[in-house]
Image (cartoon, helix red, strand yellow):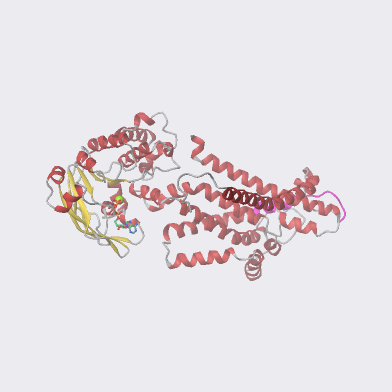
Amino acid sequence: MAKQIEVAGLDAYYGTHKAIEGISMTIEPRSVTAFIGPSGCGKSTFLRTLNRMHEVIPGARVEGKVRLEDQDLYGADVDPVSVRRTIGMVFQRPNPFPTMSIFDNVAAGLRLNGRHSRSQLDGIVEESLKGANLWNEVKDRLNKPGAGLSGGQQQRLCIARAIAVRPQVLLMDEPCSALDPISTLAIEDLISQLKQDYTIVIVTHNMQQAARVSDKTAFFNLAAQGQPGKLVEMDETSKIFTNPAEKATEDYITGRFG
Amino acid sequence: MTVQTGIQPISSARRAKDRLVQVLVYLAFALAVIPLLSVLWLVVKNGIGRLDMEFLTHSMRNIGARDAGGGAYHAIIGTLEQVLLASLIAVPIGLLTAVYLVEYGEGGRLSRTISFFVDVMTGVPSVVSGLFVLAFWILVLGMPFSGFAGALALSILMMPVVVRSAEEMLRLVPRELREASYALGVPKWRTIVKVVLPTAFTGIVTGVMLAVARVAGETAPLLLTVFVTDSINNDPFNGPQMGLPLYVFDQAGRPTDTAVDRAWTGALTLILIVMLLNLVARLITWWRSPARRR
Ligand SMILES: Nc1ncnc2c1ncn2[C@@H]1O[C@H](COP(=O)(O)OP(=O)(O)OP(=O)(O)O)[C@@H](O)[C@H]1O
Ligand SMILES: [Mg+2]
């Protein structure tokens, strides 16, 4: 059940500092959308507004509209907890729960949200770990601590943990920035597989990666230092990388700045 | 003048400085350890003689002023009950306060006020907490001297220690872990209970043990609240009790050698009890730690 996301006129603030301004876009279901742009232009901030994670930072707030199909995510009676259950997230740095085993890490989202029978959990954990390409490496040590895995394995563990709760959208903030090329490739393969069932948004600093995995690409930029970040353009990935409409996009992609 | 470039051997001046500081550090360590060891040595040397079954199982009832024998059973029971009750009061309140300060306070006016008063409480001399319970609980409310009154006084001393140490431990839990939990659609309170507190568990237990060790040896507040008795009183809610620090104080003030011996043994018993509690806490944290399952 992948769903479409529609954003209209979105601003996000940290206290009085406006980090992003006037962002409108449509994110298609069953596709991969990549966000690119120079450091500090608000990619992470924007990503976090999509599942109401922005507001967990003290003083942070959002203005504007985000719709998931026909639901306003910032509606007055919407429970942010249920939004986050529907729209999962993988962070830049792998962050498995240090007190939990590999099994418990993957089961955490389900366990912390309600009762499941052991056999149900077993099934979901195996399926999620297979989905994250990690099952073969860890199937013999599910009871060992999650923190004992390598960085790349930990990141795939976090992906397994995120897909175990069956979200409809998966947000990934530079999921490969701390990984070696082999783990990166494994995760890119995984993203291509996952897009059959999920709507995927990925932030990346790696142009090749954006070109490889995404269907659409959005380029963000700052007008000047201290100004809020804005969406410059968004289009088919092939078009952005070969024939972008804006000069700034071309300059960024060809490495003339950023 | 030559400009020095490239990789150089360590200069002899730096080597000498390194040696000097090393010696100073070891000296400081020795200075800190000498009093500790000498206290331990004295207590063990003077206390081991009377550390027998009679001491651990008998009270001072019907022991005459010059008699040998007698024991501290009533004081051991009293100390255990008083410290347990004090912990039952102080640990939940202290822990919840710390959770409020770290997770919900967000630097607001209320949390700053609480923080200020916790600091003030840290500085309250122990005899004042005893006086407070004496004045409020016993004189105004008309409650009897009891182990519970002593526990109240001790809990006042424990609370700020628990709050401060738990607060520090909770702040050490990385933001990313909380966010990972929120991003799975886990409500804030469950995140605190299932992710934040277990992650900080070891540190919190250590902090609680420090608080217990601190109050287990308090004499002044007990003097004013549990009074002194030579008989066994198992009921901490009724009537005067004894405590090990009180017992030591009481026996050491008596003029006979047998009483002074009992005081030493009482002190040794108190040290042993605190050590035993620490050991139990270590075992609990080891048993709960992820390293065990590796
Ligand atoms: N917790 C925060 N508190 C205050 N300001 C913040 C916070 N996080 C980010 N910002 C500010 O918001 C702006 C956008 O930051 P953001 O992290 O979204 O950038 P980014 O595009 O993800 O950068 P990068 O590519 O380096 O990850 C920056 O100016 C940053 O300083
Ligand atoms: Mg970022």
Residue A205 visible in image: yes
- Residue occupying the point 59% across, 45% down: B281
Q: Nearer the viewer, residue A109 or B43?
A: B43
Residue A198 visible in image: no
Look at the image and give the residue range highlighted in magenta. B64-81
Splitting the image into 4 quarters, where does residue A207 fall?
top left
- Residue occupying the point 53% across, 49% down: B203
Q: Nearer the viewer, residue B187 or B138?
A: B187
- Residue occupying the point 63% across, 56% down: B214
Q: Is residue A203 above or below residue B127?
A: above
Q: Position of residue A51 (x, y in %)?
A: 28, 51
Q: Is residue A139 above or below residue A113?
A: above
- Residue occupying the point 60% across, 53% down: B210
Look at the image and say whether residue B69 sits in the magenta stretch.
yes
Q: Position of residue B163 (x, y in %)?
A: 53, 58
Q: Is residue A147 above or below residue A255?
A: above
B52 left or right, relative to B294: right
Q: Is residue A30 above or below residue A12?
A: above
Q: Position of residue B63 (x, y in %)?
A: 83, 53
Image quarter in which the N terminus of chain A is found: top left
B202 left or right, relative to A165: right
